[in-house]
Image (cartoon, rainbow, N blue to C red):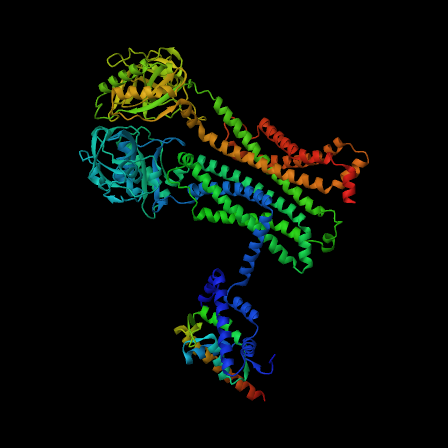
Amino acid sequence: MNPRRPLARLLALLRKRHLDVDLEDEIQAHLELAQRDAISRGLSPEKAREEARRRFGAIEQMKEAHRDRRSIRWIEALGKDFRYGLATLSRAPGFTAVIVGVLALGIGGTVAMFGVVDAVLLKSLPFAKPDRIVGVWEAPRPGVVNDTTVPQFFGWERSATVFEALAAEQPVTAALNEKNGPIRLSGDLVTPAYFKVFALTVAFGRNFTPEDGQSGADPVIILSDAAWKSYFGGDAGILHRRLILDGEACQVIGVLPPGAFDRSRIQFWKPLVFTAAQRLSNIHSLTVYGRLRPGITLAQARSQMQAIHAALAQTEPIQERKGTIAVEPLAKLLAGANLQRSISVAFWAVFLVLLIACANTANLLFAQGATRGRELAVRTALGAGRGRLVTQLLTESFALCVLGGVAGVAVAYVLIRLAKPLLSQSLPFTADVRLNLNVLSFAAFVVLGIVLLSGVFPALQASAVNLAQSLKQSVRGPSHAHVRVRRAIVIGELALSLVLVCGAVLLARSFLKLRELDTGIRIENVVTMSIDLPMDAYPTSGKAALFYAALTGRLHSIPGIANVGLSTYLPLQWISNGEAIQVAGAEKLVRVRFKRVDPGYFSTLGIPVLKGRGITGRDRDGTPRIVVINQALEARLVEAGMKDPIGKMVRLSSTDYDGKKPLMLEVQIAGMIRSERTASPGYPDPAVVYVPIAQAPSPHLNVLVRTGEETASVLPAIRQAVREIDPHLPLGNIATMQQIRDETLSPASRPAWLIGAYALIAALLAAIGLFGLISYSVTEQRREIGIRMALGARSTDVLAQVLRRALGMVFISIGLGLLGTFALTRVMASLLYEVSPLDPLSLAAGCASMVLIGLLAAFLPAHRASRLDPAATLREAG
Amino acid sequence: MSAIKAEIPYGTLDLLILKTLKTMGKLHGYAVARRIEQVSGDSFQLSQGSIYPALIRLQQEGWITAEWGTSETSRKVKFYSLTRAGRKQLSVEVANWEKTIAFMARFLEEST
């Protein structure tokens, strides 16, 4: 078949007006020419015109034939119906606005959520052959993830043949001194093959070469596109610049193309160069990624890595001999089980709202169909077939849904824009949430689904008009079947919203529990700020110690500041592991998390010393080394065979000032404090050892300040104090402890807010549905109510009767809704903290609120019914 | 009105138009209609208007092209001309038609 003609016919649809004008011109020309011929044959102009017309044939028929030939008529007819539908809708703007608004909310939420689902779960990672990229790490016990040591990494790199490229990464921050003052950049120290793992090459400049990773190589960096544009204005001469990072002049050798990494926190990459000591150290500090060779399966990679691990354990200082080596696809690492669960729960929650919106639309269309009975009956009487009526009604609901869909996509766009900061925080950097083709097709699919779900039944129902009955005024409203369907829809709506409301109440309770969670510290009026001392300005621990002393001294002198503390890790934040305590006589090491703090730390956070003493100003460089332990560590030490550890000596592994050389220190355990929480709920407190920062300085630290009342007012003074000590020092993140607490606890609270908001919308929609149905039936039964009142029923009886009917529906829906809630127990359990998914109090609260909503929705129509004037209704109906 | 004359046989109008355009070159609609009437020697009845639906179809198939121009009487008219594909199509249709005629002739002969 020649494809030209169907295409031409489709095009003709669009050029209809032009083609019609063309044809009209042509007919005129034809008639004029024919007339001239006839005149030249001797006819009078009048006669000639008649002759021309006669020989031409029926003009209008020809035009129709022409249109039939050139175009696709049924589409044209559909277009006409669609325009007619829009006209009908514009005659009832209130009705249209309500439906379109409700649909827009439902569709908008669902489409926006689908955008997230698409970006995180459906789309493959934005790298070439993304399924080949894997993460590799040591898993000594199931669920435990160990970073990789340098000897391990080199061992893997030497022996593994399953990888095309294997690279290690270690996060770093650096101060960049630019004209406008110092800024802090986040970067990754990486081994040279890093970008090969992600199959990325620089947009210009050059990639890292193996030589860049040799010790003694000139320091070089690659910038992300975002960093290049925002810090250097997209300067084309960037490759000729040396940037001073922590005092080290680094040559910029390349800039990455725009892409996924622009959404990550990483702004530059620098080759990891290892010192001789690091090559032997067993500090677990590297994150390792690899690109599998084509054809290598995960199982093959795992078994080879296992063999390599076993061989390495013989020759290298590896502590965890028993564990396995995990090789997992990057996609799985980025979208972990928790994230997947949160996303799918949020998606189904919005989807429920969409279903309710859909039911509401169907309900309104039913109501509208009933009021249009006469119009449809007239059209039937004029000869319109039932199919024609159904098509027209469906086209109308199609027009409605398309309007709702367009508005919904706009809502989705706005939602995604608004949620951008939140999304970039909680989604992996590879997820780019936008309204792409996938998402838009999903939206189109949803609109079609809604047309079918909400349009077909009302259209069939409304078109099944009984001609004679409808035309007679006496008809007492639509059939019982009609009311039954509407009742079923409203009950469904109520049940679905009960599921959402119960979920929201459960999540809210869990959220409250989290808020009350005892973190073991006082966080009111505490501000924190991170500081990273550049190695060039502070090359020795002595210099750093001087800085601490100067800083705490100055901060103490600021009026309004009550306490000042320093620590390497913030409270409520995870402390990385890797260090251990050796108890004399015990074979096994006790793994500890290592936190350097100053004397002010415990008092600033209100952490009590339970045994022995805390850290004091006398614990300086040169005085005997001491440590303070937490309760969890005491328990571990006792387990390891140490009776009453306070006052005893132990050996503690550690690293030196710049974190490169491992040390083994003899320390005395001076005291024990009450455990502070260091991570998300659900994890037991880890064993923590607190080391006086004056005895073991670190260039990376956080300042904690407790103020009298207003925290914000002292911030400028704090900045000023830091600037006075060192004007080149960039200030790091400033946050209140409350913010940090919220961050630690928020993964659990985010879906709570979302579902809470949607539960509210759902309940509102269901209430509107119930209100609509009860008002409708009260109007329909005016006469019956009038008779009853005339026979002596009091208005309270009528009120009670209407409310009873509404409550009947609410109770059925509560039954159904609770069944739904029970079905979702397993999903909910994973989102709740210390609240059972069947928590009777929450479920009761959910049901009670539904009853309340039902009563509120029914009260207005019930009240109206009870105020009916029996005489008037009887006269009107009679 | 004038149902005395025979209608043009169904399906032959396309062939007539293509053939006309091949013989006469570029023509406007009225001229095509006149030419067909003249050749048929008024033995067939043609509503002149009926050529237009046929013309649009042939145009959509890509067998003829149309362009606006001026007639000998300086009237703005649409001219049609045969395309290369149209020439090919014409030979195909002529061959088909000849086969049909031969078959019909044989069939009618045998049946009588």
Q: Residue at x 46, y 64 (%)?
A: A8
Tell whether A565 sits left or right of B40.
left
- The residue positioned 46% from the left and 20% from the top of the image is A518
For residue B14, above or below residue A810: below
Which residue is the extreme one toward the right?
A: A791
Q: Compared with residue A140, is residue A200 higher up or lower down, i.e. above or below?
A: below
Disc tally is: 0
> Does residue B86 sit above or below A626 in this rendering?
below
- Residue nearest the observer in this picture, A454 or A47: A47
Q: Is residue A822 visible?
A: no
User: What quarter of the picture does the C terminus of chain A occupy?
Assistant: top right
Residue A649: x and y in percent read 31, 14
Q: Nearer the viewer, residue A852 or B79?
A: B79
Q: From where the camera sits, is residue A201 visible? A: yes
Q: Position of residue A495 (x, y in %)?
A: 61, 37
Which quadrant of the view contains residue A765? top right
Q: Choose between A868 and A128: the one closer to the eye.
A: A868
Is A766 situated left or right of A288 in this image?
right
Place residue A130 in its image quadrant. top left
Q: Position of residue A281 (x, y in %)?
A: 26, 28
Q: Position of residue A812 (x, y in %)?
A: 66, 36
